Image (tube, helix red, strand yellow):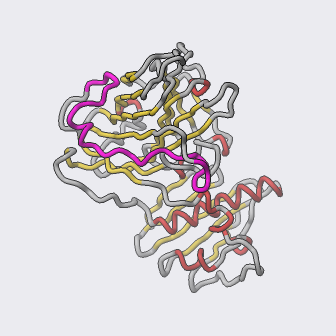
């Protein structure tokens, strides 16, 4: 495959956009907002998974921002509030969530049925952040679980493995109200779960360590009226009605500090302007392939404007190699000694120079 390299900043990119044309950042703005970050602290005591996150550690943990519509800015605010919290210890990631709900309902009772046909709560986890081989765990207000492993996102031809049952997971639900009794008014339901790191470990490499970052997102599917359409309320909006966009999930950072014993300021693990541009090029390639049946073959074919050219640190380089059916784009950051690489299947990797 012939390599075609273009350099940004003061190097080879010098083409101008036609008057009125949208740049990459403008075209794909909804999928390029800065993902949220969460600092996850160690728990100060043993967490009992009973659906009632009332331990002192839970009370000290900060909640996420309220969930928003999956499509992001400009879409209606969810009718009912939802927030989540996270903690960790040497064995597990702990997740709790509070879902405001005036009429708690759940009819599905069998594991690994399609739980989002009920109102549900969902967790998506990509421990190494490469956008492939990630996990999904759903549950309804009965505490019935639907868990699966995906090799890559559906947009890239991914498949799910429903036979994966999260080993050792503990999950419980508490109802502040009554189940399936619409004649009375309920308040909320809460979810509490412990997800063992061994259930998410590849190649004996424990991802649950202080200083590590994961990608994570939460979703709530809500059926406000019979027959739908369903509402999709999430912690980190993806920009379209599709949760299977790991690049759009939030960042989870594991602190070595015990909750309540000091704070850490969240910082992103990547040079986020370079990361943003890389994904803007990915979405442009997806769009072009869908319309023309092939990928763009050179960086000069991308609508790069001033906002893209000025976003990268001085000395950064952007390059690519492509055929009609495959592509690979990268951004080299000499000041950091790394290269960010993204292929046509949405797999993100960092290579040392």
Whether 282 is among the magenta residues is no
Residue 173 visible, this orientation = no
Residue at the (43%, 62%) spot, across then down: 270
Q: Quadrant of the C terminus?
A: bottom left
In the rendered image, residue 63 lying in the magenta stretch gets the answer yes
Magenta region: 48-76
Question: In terms of secondary structure, what is the magenta stretch mainly?
Answer: loop
Residue at horizontal 26 percent and vertical 45 percent from the top: 41
Residue 179, percent from left and from top: 48, 16
Q: Position of residue 98 (x, y in %)?
A: 40, 34
| Up/down of 222 relative to 126, above or below | above
Image quarter in which the N terminus is found:
bottom right
341 relative position to 40: left or right:
right
Q: Residue furthest right?
A: 292
Expressed as whole percent of the image width and height from the top left, the position of residue 149 reads 53, 32
Residue 144 to residue 290: above or below: above
């Amino acid at each position: 495959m012939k390599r075609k390299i273009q350099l940004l900043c003061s190097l080879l990119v010098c083409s101008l956009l036609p008057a009125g044309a949208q740049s990459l950042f403008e075209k794909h703005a909804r999928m390029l907002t800065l993902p949220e970050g969460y600092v996850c602290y160690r728990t100060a005591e043993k967490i009992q998974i009973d659906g009632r996150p009332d331990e002192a550690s839970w009370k000290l943990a900060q909640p996420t921002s309220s969930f928003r519509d999956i499509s992001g800015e400009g879409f209606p605010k969810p009718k009912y509030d939802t927030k989540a919290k996270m903690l960790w210890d040497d064995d597990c990631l702990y997740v709790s969530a509070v879902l405001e709900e005036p009429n708690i309902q759940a009819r599905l009772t069998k594991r690994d049925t399609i739980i989002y046909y009920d109102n549900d709560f969902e967790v998506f986890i990509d421990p190494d952040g490469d956008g492939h081989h990630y996990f999904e765990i759903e549950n309804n207000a009965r505490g019935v679980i639907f868990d699966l492993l995906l090799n890559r996102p559906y947009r890239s031809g991914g498949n799910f493995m429903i036979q994966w049952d999260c080993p050792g997971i503990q999950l419980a639900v508490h109802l502040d109200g009554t189940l399936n009794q619409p004649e009375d008014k309920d308040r909320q339901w809460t979810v509490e779960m412990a997800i063992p790191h061994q259930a998410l470990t590849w190649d004996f490499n424990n991802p649950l360590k202080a200083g590590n970052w994961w990608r994570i997102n939460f979703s709530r599917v809500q059926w406000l009226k019979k027959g739908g359409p369903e509402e999709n309320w999430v912690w980190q909006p993806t920009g379209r009605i599709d949760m299977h966009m790991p690049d759009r999930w939030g960042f989870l950072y594991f602190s070595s500090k015990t909750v309540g014993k000091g704070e850490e300021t969240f910082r992103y693990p990547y040079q986020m302007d370079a990361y943003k541009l890389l994904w803007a090029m990915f979405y442009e390639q997806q769009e072009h392939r869908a319309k023309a049946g092939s990928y763009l073959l050179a960086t000069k074919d991308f609508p790069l404007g001033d906002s893209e050219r000025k976003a990268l640190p001085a000395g950064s380089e952007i390059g690519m190699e492509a055929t009609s059916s495959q592509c690979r784009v990268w951004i080299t950051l000499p000041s950091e000694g790394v290269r960010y690489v993204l292929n046509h299947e949405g797999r993100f990797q960092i290579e040392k120079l």
